[in-house]
């Protein structure tokens, strides 16, 4: 991920790990049933729980997994400067296909999610 020479090289998996937790929380409300179904796979005890609860548990399980495998990352760890986040957000719609996404973030939402991941602990 290199933007105008201001950002160090970050591997693809690390890039996903940097942004995924924030966008997971962003997407979950728009795809609550899908997240709930996965949450019930993670925790069969949620079989009769409301979708909103099962979806929240799904997100928590994914976050815990990322922590367990050492992929709970933040931008600061990679010496990414805070000011570069706006440039990353501005390029956030350059993906070829958004049709499968349950919710499409606008540039301000992308920027907010990136800022949330800047100092994640």
Image (tube, grey):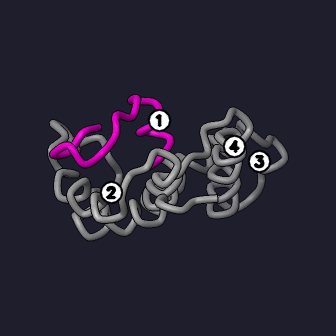
The kind of secondary structure element at disc 2 is loop
Q: Quadrant of the N terminus?
A: top left
What residue did someone put label 2 on?
103
Q: Residues within 10 Å of mark 2 (few under 14, many from 20)?
A: some
**Among numbered discs 2 and 3, the one appearing first in the sequence:** 3
Task: Inspect the magenta stretch and tell me whether residue 56 lies in it.
Answer: no
The answer to whether the residue labelled 4 contacts the one labelled 1, judged by CB atoms less than 8 Å apart, is: no
- Mark 1 — residue? 14
For the residues labelled 4 and 1, the Cα–Cα distance comes to: 13 Å
Labels 3 & 4 near each other (Cβ < 8 A): no
Which is closer to the viewer, label 2 or label 3? 2
Looking at the figure, which quarter contains the C terminus? bottom right
Q: Which residues are magenta?
A: 1-19
Q: CA gap, disc 2 to disc 3?
A: 26 Å
Residue 47's disc number: 3
Q: Secondary structure at mark 4?
A: helix
Locate residue 53 relative to residue 89 in the image: left or right.
Answer: right
3D distance between C-alphas at marks 1 and 2? 23 Å
Q: Nearer the viewer, mark 1 or mark 2?
A: 1
Name the residue: 26% across, 70% down: 108
């Amino acid at each position: 991920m290199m933007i105008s020479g201001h950002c160090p090289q970050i591997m693809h998996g690390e890039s996903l790990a940097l942004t995924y937790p924030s966008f997971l929380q962003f997407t979950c409300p728009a795809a609550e049933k899908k997240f709930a179904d996965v949450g019930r796979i993670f925790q069969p005890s949620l079989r009769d729980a409301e979708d909103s609860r099962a979806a929240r548990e799904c997100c928590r399980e994914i976050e815990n997994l990322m922590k367990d495998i050492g992929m709970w990352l933040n931008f600061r760890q990679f010496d990414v400067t805070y000011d570069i986040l706006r440039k990353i957000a501005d390029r956030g719609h350059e993906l070829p296909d958004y049709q499968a996404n349950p919710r499409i973030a606008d540039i301000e939402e992308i920027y907010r999610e990136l800022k949330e991941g800047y100092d994640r602990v």
